[in-house]
Image (cartoon, rainbow, N blue to C red):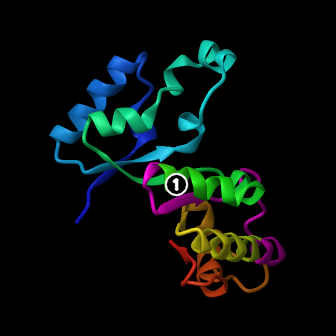
Amino acid sequence: MQKAVYQGMLGKPGNVDAALRQLEEVKLLGIDGVELDAETIRPADEVQRLLAPNGKFRWSELMRAARLKTTAVCDSLAAVKKSPYSEAKLCNDLGASVLTVSGPDSFVWFREESLYELCDDLNLMGETLRACGVRLVYRTSNAELNRLNGTGERALSYMLRMTDKSTLGF
């Protein structure tokens, strides 16, 4: 079984040497890979590097140097919906076959209409990404345990029922 950690759990190293040391320590713990956060690994322009230097390293190079695999890339649902082909390319470039997303920032979990639209979006994005060799995985939080108005069904149960398991994982 492959063991991985989420990049966000590593904190924000202050420089590239600290980032590499951190990844090497993760490897020494017996971890095989890291799920990279797309927001911190996208190429940055010079202004972004000056404003947020700790998040804009060349993570693919650091991962190789630490002998770790990129197990997945994590990004916002909005980013994937806006540009699924760019997201698939990012995953493919990093050697990740999985793209994880979590629910929208502002969302009405107890409305069936909202969940129907979300499931429809997830199915469409999952199909698009699958055609590019990437599996979409939805990362749940406590919000999906809310109950729908009227039926009392949990949002997560509804999502599991309304999404295509061949293109979306949970």
Position of residue 45 relative to residue 29, above or below, is above
In this rendered view, identify the residue nearer to me: 59 or 163. 59
Q: Residue at x 36, y 25 (%)?
A: 19
Side (left or right) of 14 relative to 107: left
Q: Residue at x 62, y 27 (%)?
A: 44
Q: Quadrant of residue 128?
A: bottom right
Side (left or right) of 154 relative to 67: right
Residue type beneath disc 1: Cys
In this rendered view, identify the residue nearer to me: 1 or 92. 92
Q: Which residues are magenta?
A: 94-117
- Residue 66 in percent (x, y) is at 26, 36
Instruction: Name the secondary structure under disc 1.
Output: helix
Side (left or right) of 65 relative to 164: left
Q: Residue at x 73, y 86 (%)?
A: 151
In this rendered view, identify the residue nearer to me: 31 or 49. 49
Which residue is identified by label 1? 91
- Residue 26 in percent (x, y) is at 24, 38
